[in-house]
Structure formats: C-alpha cells, structure tokens
C-alpha cells in the first residue's frame, strides 16, 4: 500500500535522510519519535504538500509526484494544520473539496457528522480543535480512501471518541485492502492497534518493523545492577537506576540467557522509544565528556 524508497528532504536546518520502509495492505502503522523527529514532514511528503529532494513514495502503486492526482485520490488525511476554509460550514467545505475525489459521497459525510455529533451547517472556525479533527476524519472517510494518513489526532479527542476512533481504524483495514499510518505520542493506542511501528529520530529511521519482530527484538530487564552488568555490553541499550532496582532495555535474541533473579518482560512501544532516546543522549554525553 505504501512504499517509501530512499526519501530525503532538506527543510532549513532540518533534513529527512534516506528513509525507506513499506506498509502492506490491510495493516496499521504507528509512526513514533520525539518532537522534531520529522514525522509531520514525512506525512507532508506522502500528501504531496512537500516535494522530495530524492527518492520516491508510492501509494497503492501510484507515484505521489509523477501520478499525483491518482495517488491523492487514494489518500485520506487528518492534520494538525488547517487546510480547509474556516468561513465555510462543514458541509460546504466537504462539498467544495469533495469535487477533487472520485468517490466522495455527501450522504456518507453527513452520516459521519451525525455519528461524531457535528453540526454540518456550522462554520468550521466555530468548532473546537477536537471537532475540527473529527470533521477532517469524517471527510476523509467519506471519499473512500485506501490509505489514511493521520497526524496526532487522538491527543485532542475525549476518551469516549478516542475509543470509537480506534475502533473505526481497526474496522477500516478489515477487508485487507486498506491501510493506516498514524503518527502519535499516545503509544498506548499503538500497543493496542499497530501492526507495524516506524521510529524516526533526527530525521533518520531508527527502525521500521512489524510488531512480532519488534517484540522479539527487545526485552526489559529489572533487578540488581551487577546482574544486569553481566549481560553483554553490546546488548544493553540503556540502563536506569531506581531506588530499589535497575531497569534496562536490552537487545534480545534466541540465544539470550538471563539470570533467573532478573525480571524479564516484553517492553511497550513507549519503553522502547524512551530507552533508545535516553541511550542516545547518554552516548552523546560520554563522547563530549
């Protein structure tokens, strides 16, 4: 569904550097990384809002640059940046921009407005941040995209709607022909629904892999520091001392042999991101020291 190949883009002092990964049909990808990692910039490249310096992006086989109209017809988006007209009603916005999509249905848009408790006759700029994102989501679903591109929407949803939102996403991919890429800081949502995880940091790709591979790649170990220090130094990504024990993220493999007194568990996505970023800062500090 989504093919990103050797993509680079310079944006002032920041640069996305040689990104390559794939998202097959029928799956949800979580896009994670700290603020300023390049998540939004990458999504803008997918949507054709930025032009690539190098590389290519394909949406269901359509090149986003050389086959822009065909590629965009397959995309639905929810962005923090407002690309719609604030002076128009939700319905007027949907009908105006719906003309650019071959499968837009006004009736379906109005149905989603009802489901999301939105007044389609009310001007867009009279809505809250969360309601504006709900509008974008309703519009995206109303033109039957094959790929949903979502940039940090859930942080602005109340818990009840967030649950419904996640249910809609899992239903969206059930036929095996649709996919989702969701950039979010709420990694607990990704622990629940993500089939793939892509981690950006400083514009570079830390990793992009399916959940099974991710869960097999790392372990969180907790116990006495001297026992953790007995593990291979190359396997320890970062360790953190607590009041009563030390916790560390380690690279895992089928030959890993852990002391029986160490508590070993599969880390969450948040654990993995946190310890990798802490390890990076520690290594940088040691080099400077």
Image (cartoon, rainbow, N blue to C red):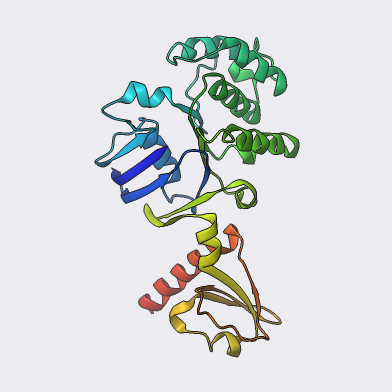
Q: Left or right: where does residue 207 sit relative to residue 194?
A: left
Q: Quadrant of residue 28?
A: top right
Q: Position of residue 168 (x, y in %)?
A: 64, 33
Outermost residue to the right: 160
Q: Left or right: where does residue 160 sit relative to residue 121?
A: right
Q: Quadrant of the C terminus?
A: bottom left
* Along the viewing direction, whichever of 120 and 110 lies nearer the viewer: 110
Report the residue at 64% width, 31% height from top: 130
Report the residue at 56% width, 83% height from top: 257
Outermost residue to the front: 175
Q: Quadrant of residue 219?
A: bottom right
Q: Position of residue 192 (x, y in %)?
A: 65, 49
Q: Quadrant of the N terminus?
A: top left
Q: Position of residue 173 (x, y in %)?
A: 56, 35
Q: Left or right: where does residue 61 sit relative to residue 31?
A: left
* Along the viewing direction, whichever of 220 and 247 lies nearer the viewer: 220
* Along the viewing direction, whichever of 43 and 261 lies nearer the viewer: 261
The answer to whether residue 32 is seen in the rendering is: no
Q: Position of residue 212 (x, y in %)?
A: 54, 58
The answer to whether residue 223 is seen in the rendering is: yes
């Amino acid at each position: 569904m989504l093919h990103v190949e050797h993509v680079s883009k310079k944006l002032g002092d920041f640069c996305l550097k040689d990104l390559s990964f794939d998202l097959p049909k029928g799956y949800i990808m979580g896009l994670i990384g700290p603020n300023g990692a390049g998540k939004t910039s990458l999504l803008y490249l997918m949507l054709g809002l930025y032009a690539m310096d190098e590389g290519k992006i394909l949406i269901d086989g359509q090149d986003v640059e050389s086959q822009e109209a065909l590629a965009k017809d397959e995309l639905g988006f929810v962005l923090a940046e407002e690309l719609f007209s604030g002076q128009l009603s939700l319905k007027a916005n949907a009908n105006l921009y719906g003309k650019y999509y071959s499968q837009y249905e006004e009736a379906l848009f109005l149905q989603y407005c009802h489901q999301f408790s939105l007044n389609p006759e009310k001007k867009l700029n009279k809505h809250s941040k969360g309601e504006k994102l709900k509008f974008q989501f309703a519009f995206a679903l109303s033109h039957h995209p094959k790929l949903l591109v979502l940039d940090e929407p859930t942080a602005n949803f109340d818990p009840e709607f967030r649950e419904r939102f996640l249910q809609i996403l899992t239903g969206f991919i059930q036929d095996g022909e649709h996919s989702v890429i969701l950039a979010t800081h709420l990694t607990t949502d990704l622990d629940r629904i993500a089939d793939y995880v892509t981690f950006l940091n400083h514009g570079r790709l830390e990793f992009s892999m399916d959940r099974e591979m991710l869960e097999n790649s790392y372990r969180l170990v907790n116990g006495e520091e001297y026992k953790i220090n007995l593990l291979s130094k190359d396997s320890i990504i970062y360790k953190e001392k607590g009041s009563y024990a030390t916790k560390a993220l380690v690279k895992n493999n089928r030959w890993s042999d852990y002391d029986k007194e160490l508590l070993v568990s599969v880390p969450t996505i948040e654990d993995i991101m946190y310890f990798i970023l802490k390890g990076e800062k520690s290594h940088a500090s040691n080099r400077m020291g």
